[in-house]
Amino acid sequence: MRYSNAMTRRAPSGGLTTIDRFYDPIEARIVAGRLEAAGVPVHLAGIHHISANWMLALALGGVQLQVPSARVDEAREILAEDVALESEEDHCPNCGSTDTSRDSNRWRLSMVLVHAFSLPLPWGGEERRCQSCGFRWEQR
């Protein structure tokens, strides 16, 4: 979870600048990965302390995402971009349509059995159905 009003703090003499703060170290690593993939060097201050004892997140001010002061604007532009993730499973393997839905009967049956017997069932994947051509497939 991000802090609602993350402030930018510039380090003296062109060092590192904190551009965002996070309560969750995993979210901080994901955002840092986006910047590193674009070639911007990143430092996550406090990540090890908070990973070891998550209750320190508030006391330490969260995980601080820091970049070189000269690349603050570039980092903000990268993080401002919307990243749309496309998945092969969202398309029908038969006709290529994106109009697909989950086969609800299989899901309902598994929920009834799980609640009736209080046992987790290894149910494999999720069965999908194409609304355009009627083709069914199992998505894992």
Image (cartoon, helix red, strand yellow):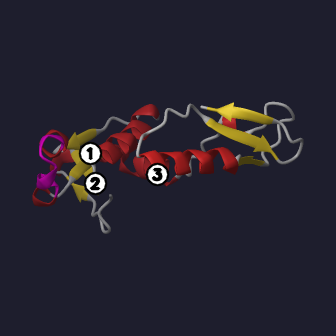
Q: Which residue is mark 2?
A: 22
The first of marks 2 and 3 along the sequence is: 2
104 relative to 140, above or below: below
Q: Please give the name of the residue rendered at 35% of the width and 47% of the height, measured from the top-left corner.
A: 27
38 relative to 14, above or below: above
27 relative to 4, above or below: above
Q: Secondary structure at mark 1?
A: helix
Q: Locate residue 51 relative to residue 140 in the image: left or right.
A: left
The circle on residue 115 is: 3
Assess disc 2: are there few (<14), some (14-19) or many (≥20) residues with their C-alpha within 10 Å of its C-alpha. many
Mark pair 2, 1: CA separation: 7 Å
Give the quarter of the image for residue 95: top right
Q: Position of residue 4 (x, y in %)?
A: 32, 68
Main SS of residues in magenta: helix
Give the quarter of the image for residue 52: top left
Q: Is residue 52 magenta?
A: yes
The first of marks 1 and 3 along the sequence is: 1
Q: Please give the name of the residue rendered at 56% of the width and 44% of the height, measured from the top-left corner.
A: 110
Quadrant holding the C terminus: top right
Q: Which residue is mark 1?
A: 25
The residue furthest right is 133
In the image, what residue type sits under mark 3? His
Q: Position of residue 15 (x, y in %)?
A: 20, 43
- The total number of labels drawn is 3
Q: Position of residue 120 (x, y in %)?
A: 43, 39
Mark pair 2, 3: CA separation: 37 Å
Q: Locate residue 79 relative to residue 27 in the image: left or right.
A: right
Q: Nearer the viewer, residue 62 or 18?
A: 62
Q: Nearer the viewer, residue 20 or 53?
A: 53
